[in-house]
Image (tube, helix red, strand yellow):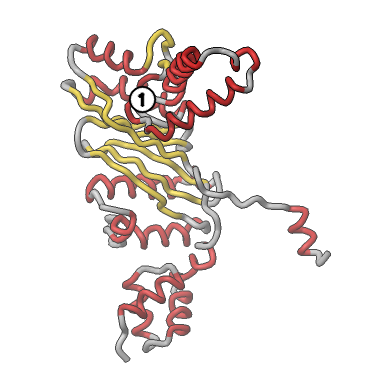
Amino acid sequence: MAITAKDVQALREMTGVGMMDCKKALTEAEGDMDKAVEILREKGLAASQKKAGRIAAEGMAYAAVIDGVGVVVEVNAETDFVGKNEKFVDFVKGVAAVVAKEKPADLDALMALPFGNGRTVQEEQQEMVLVIGENIKVRRFAFYTDGVSVAYVHAGGKIGVLVNLETSLSAEQVEAVGKDVAMQIAALNPRFWDKSQVDQATLDEEKKIMLVQMANDPKMASKPEKVKEGIVAGKLGKFYKENCLLQQEFVKDNSMDVAKYIETSAKALGGTITFKDAVRFEKGEGIEKKQENFAEEIAKQLGK
């Protein structure tokens, strides 16, 4: 019986096992899907099937500069404990190395790439599931090939930040500046890098809120519109300082903003430094964690 690509894909979706192993199992099973699943389970390859449905919101965010390429990745696991597991950490670093070397276009492309040990990233991820016994999932990545990148990992992998700079100086010279900016991003999580990036819709929404607040304040409601507009402009300045990285007060020295800190540092080093971009990954952000109700779970087990 001829094995079609559609059959292989269907088996892969059912088991989460790599394409080649699925094809071999189907060939051995002579096209029988149930038998192919059984073969994969017998080989231990489909042990990850049940685990794939579990919520993985822990793990590690990791950033590094590898051969001049700045990389940041997030790999999830189910428990915080696994995030500290040596094998898991090595897998995360291995994924970052693949990204730096191959520069994949997207997550699917990354998962199909060789991990460097005869397996693909997808197959190595499945191996981690089998070895560690939890759902492990490469979630996202980003990289910079231009300029100088500086990486920072906060709290052992809770947050990974990659800062990209354009500079006339060497990577070694700007390392400290980049690290300071990355730490600022990790701590304050700005919505925008610069006030020029704040879109009109966001500004209109902020102005609307401020005007409603003034209308509800008896002291402010009676003031002329021109005065209110002036107050709104001042409040928008405060909005920029709170939400835009380069306009934020520099955490280590609140006498200046981040833009001034970069400019002052560049001058002291005898060159130029321009902040270009950054990526901040916080492990598990946006993933809805399962809330366990242990009393309910025990009651179920007791048949109450």
Q: Residue furthest left?
A: 168
Please, what secondary structure does the residue beneath circle 1 have? helix
Which residue sits furthest bottom? 1
Q: Is residue 1 left or right of residue 206?
A: left
Residue 5 picture location, percent across and down? 31, 78
Work out whether 219 lies above or below 5.
above
- Quadrant of the frame with the C terminus: bottom right
Quarter of the figure that contains the N terminus: bottom left
Residue 81 falls left or right of residue 96: right
- Judged left or right of residue 218, residue 302 is right
Q: Quadrant of residue 86?
A: top left
Is residue 269 rendered to the left or right of residue 285?
Answer: left
The structure residue drawn at horizontal position 28% and vertical position 23%, both measured from the top left corner, is: 175
At 49% from the left and 43% from the top, the residue drawn is 285
Residue 166 location in percent, x, y?
Answer: 21, 27
Residue 171 in the image: above or below residue 129: above
Residue found at the far right of this picture: 304
Q: Amino acid at mark 1?
A: Lys
Mark 1 surroundings within 10 Å by alpha-carbon count, few (fewer than 14), some (14 through 19), many (20 or more): some
Measuring from the top left, give residue 28's x and y in whole percent. 36, 85
Q: Quadrant of residue 194?
A: top left
The mark total stands at 1
Tell me what residue is drawn at x 65 percent, y 16 percent.
Answer: 218
Whole-percent x, y for residue 38 in the image: 48, 80
Could you say which is closer to the camera, residue 97 or residue 183? Answer: 183
Task: Relative to 256, say whether 139 is above or below.
Answer: below
Kindly identify which residue carries mark 1: 195
Q: Image quadrant of residue 177? A: top left
Residue sitting at 54 percent across and 66 percent down? 50
Q: Nearer the viewer, residue 212 or 68?
A: 212
